[in-house]
Image: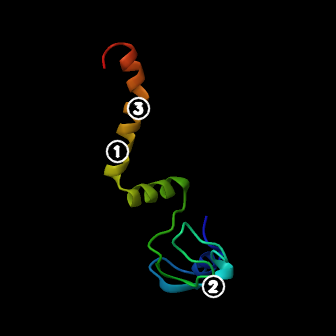
């Protein structure tokens, strides 16, 4: 899920810490294109700030929800609910 070079660069960081992580090609995407955006054999740099560390799966979920946006999550849930219920509503003649 994470580039080996980036994972190595994050090790030892503390909450609130900042660092520039440089990832060589052999610990990044190697000699392959990545999604047509990152060229083969690219040296990558990440400006990283560690803001928080989740201690439980619940905390991890809440951090991801906060990053995604509660409003977007509610909107996505409403759309999925409509898609799940609409065939039943059509069958009963309500829609």
| Mark sitting on residue 83 | 3
Mark 2 closeness class: few <14, some 14–19, many ≥20 residues within 10 Å: some
Q: Where residue 6 appears, x then y in whole percent?
A: 59, 77
**Is mark 2 in CB contact (under 8 Å) with mark 1?**
no
Mark 3 closeness class: few <14, some 14–19, many ≥20 residues within 10 Å: few
* Residue at 54% in and 62% down: 55
Instruction: Quadrant for residue 27, please give it.
Output: bottom right
State whether residue 86 is above or below residue 68: above
- Compute the Cα span from label 2 to label 3: 45 Å
Label 2 secondary element: loop
- Given this view, does label 2 or label 1 mark the residue nearer the observer? 2
Instruction: Quadrant for the N terminus, please.
Output: bottom right
Instruction: Quadrant for residue 9, please give it.
Output: bottom right
| Mark sitting on residue 74 | 1
Choose between 75 and 33: the one closer to the eye. Answer: 33
Q: Where residue 69 appears, x then y in whole percent?
A: 35, 56
Q: Is residue 4 left or right of residue 67?
A: right
- Residue identified by numbered label 2: 24
Label 3 or label 1, whichever comes before in sequence order? 1
């Amino acid at each position: 899920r994470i580039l080996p070079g980036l994972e190595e660069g994050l090790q030892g960081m503390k909450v609130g810490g900042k660092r520039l992580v440089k990832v060589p090609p052999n610990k990044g995407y190697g000699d392959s294109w990545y999604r047509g955006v990152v060229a083969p054999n690219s040296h990558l740099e990440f400006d990283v700030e560690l803001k928080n560390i989740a201690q439980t799966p619940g905390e991890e979920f809440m951090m991801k929800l906060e990053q995604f946006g509660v409003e977007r999550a509610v909107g996505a849930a409403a759309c999925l609910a409509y898609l799940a219920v609409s065939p039943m509503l059509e069958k009963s003649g309500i829609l």
